[in-house]
Amino acid sequence: MESFIQDTKSILRGAKMSLDFNRLVCAFVGIVFSILWVLVILAFGSAFKLVEITPFEIINEFLISPRLGLCGLISASVSSIKSVEGGEFVVLIVLVLGLMIIWSVFAGAVTRLAALEFARGEKTGLKDSLSFVMKKFWSYFWSPLTPILGVLFFIACNVAGGLLGKIAFAGEIAVAVGFPLAILSGFLIVFLGIVGIIGFILMFPAISSEGSDAFDAISRAYSYVLSRPIHFLSLFITIIICGTIVSFVAGYGACLVMQTSYFTVGLGMGDKLNDIRAFIAGLSGPRDMITSLNPISMRIAALFFMLYIVLIKITVGSIIVAFAGSASTIAYLIMRKDVDGTEMNDIYVDENEEDLAADETVAEAPEEPAVQQAPEPVVPPEQKEAETSGESPEKNGL
């Protein structure tokens, strides 16, 4: 019970760490690039009739909508993936690969910043963290992709075995005899898929903490989940609960700020602001609900309001992403100490980073005051002659 309370306190510290400026910037830029990538791919896909959804639907329904739309976006994404067919597969693959490239950089930077701060109390800069991530880019990229490829490989094996069943007479017998291999393949699909999904949160922190490759990150993730399943699940559930609370507070806090701003500005602006809000709200609904907005100055004002809504939503998303990266890094360090016995502050640091940290330490160290020697007393010439004449008889006497 005591360890559970300590783990919960550590995860809650991730909520505080999520407000770090550098992590928020990484998450913010990552979300912006992700939105741009999705809009560009959907624009090309809809132009070539590969997908039905257009970028304008994403913009109207999720980005400029007065609602936060996080749950709606997740459910829409899941339902879209379920109904993928034909040329949509190509669009989906390109979309996912692009998002993986984006988040291999920015999620890696978030976990690197979190690892150094939580384990060693160091707050490194964006330049250093991004430099580390670019050196380990392919490790970040392949670590989540490798289990997916493994699942797809065994699915392809079962599909190929099923195709043999279409051969008359010999096909049915071959499938019946080789079906135990299909069962084994099905087990590996479930094993790699489930453990990979829940252990995914440990892969990026493993690379950020150890400076290792994708294989080491995958093996650590699977090993920690299987070695201490109860401990890992307790951390996983704690992260989900805390993440839900953080999302709720950030989302409704942003809504409260926006509603307060609308109300106070509306006291002076009057019906003009209500017309602008009605126009923006109508864009995310049926076409017959879209109202006209005149003159052109009102449209320009509505455009700025839409931009502010998008920025607020991205900021809320940045807080959630920063928390997810910080909390998953803390969970990894806790699991590593439990399974391997490695101390929390044992974090991989490049030689260049160590030299930079040493230079900063030397630069910040206070200079010791120089010891000033007292000046020699000035003796007048008459006194020197008297002393010399006083010493000479003694020398003669010797």
Image: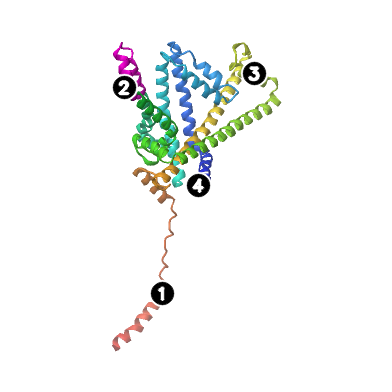
Q: Distance of mark 4 from mark 3, alpha carbons? A: 52 Å
Q: Earlier in the sequence, mark 4 or mark 1?
A: 4
Residue picked out by circle 1 = 380
**Of residues 306 and 98, the one drawn nearer to the viewer in this rendering:** 98
Q: Quadrant of residue 197?
A: top left
Q: Which residues are magenta?
A: 154-180
Residue picked out by circle 2 = 178
Residue 278 numbered mark, or none:
3
Circle 2 crowding by C-alpha within 10 Å: few under 14, some 14–19, many from 20: few
Q: Earlier in the sequence, mark 3 or mark 2?
A: 2
Circle 3 crowding by C-alpha within 10 Å: few under 14, some 14–19, many from 20: some
Q: Earlier in the sequence, mark 4 or mark 3?
A: 4
Q: Distance of mark 2 from mark 1, alpha carbons? A: 115 Å
Q: Identity of the amino acid at label 1? A: Pro
Residue 200 numbered mark, or none:
none
Tell me the SS state at disc 3.
helix
Q: Distance of mark 3 from mark 2, alpha carbons? A: 63 Å
Single out the mark in the foreground, 2 or 1: 2
Q: Identity of the amino acid at label 4? A: Ser
Residue picked out by circle 4 = 3
Q: Identity of the amino acid at label 2? A: Gly
